[in-house]
Image (cartoon, rainbow, N blue to C red):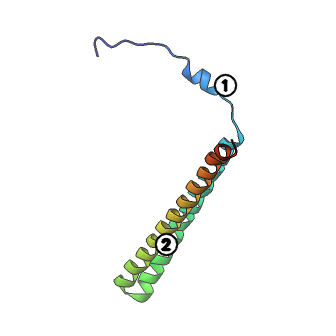
């Protein structure tokens, strides 16, 4: 690739010096917990789905259960999103209201 220019940067070195706060720990622990629970949910759904498929021999029931799982997960995420937004707006607006 002729004509390209290389340059040196010290961004990675500076990023190592950034402060690590309580908020960062909350994000890391929250994401880790979510990933673990999501993995367990997928594992359980796969195991239950295979057992139900073999025992009931009914494809419609399998689709119905999968749809119920997705509907429940979507409704839960929707509600958690509303709660998180409400809490963040309260934290943002609280200093403005007291001023």
Q: Element type at marker 2?
A: helix
Residue 88, image x, y percentages: 60, 50
Tell me if 66 is positioned left or right of 26 in this view. Answer: left
Look at 70% across and 38% down and name the residue there. 21
Look at 53% across and 58% down and name the residue there. 81
Name the one closer to the observer, 92 or 76.
92
In the image, residue 91 sits, relative to residue 45, either above or below, namely above
Q: Is residue 18 visible?
A: yes
Tell me if 21 is positioned left or right of 42 in this view. Answer: right
Look at 65% across and 41% down and name the residue there. 24
In the image, residue 96 sits, relative to residue 66, either above or below, namely above
Task: Count neighbours of disc 1 (C-alpha within 10 A) and say few if under 14, some if 14 to 19, many if 20 or more.
Answer: few
In the image, residue 10 sits, relative to residue 22, either above or below, namely above
Residue with the mark numbered 1: 17
**Is the residue under label 2 in contact with that under label 1 (CB below 8 Å)?**
no
Q: Is residue 27 visible?
A: no
Residue with the mark numbered 2: 72
Residue 72, image x, y percentages: 49, 72
Name the one closer to the observer, 97 or 31.
97
């Amino acid at each position: 690739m002729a004509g390209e220019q290389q340059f040196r940067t010290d961004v990675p070195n500076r990023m190592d010096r950034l402060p690590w706060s309580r908020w960062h720990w909350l994000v890391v622990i929250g994401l880790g917990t979510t990933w673990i629970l999501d993995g367990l949910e997928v594992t359980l759904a796969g195991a239950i789905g295979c057992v139900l498929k073999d025992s009931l021999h009914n494809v419609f029931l399998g689709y119905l259960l999968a749809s119920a799982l997705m509907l429940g997960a979507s409704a839960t995420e929707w509600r958690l999103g509303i709660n998180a937004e409400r809490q963040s707006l309260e934290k943002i607006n609280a200093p403005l209201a007291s001023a």
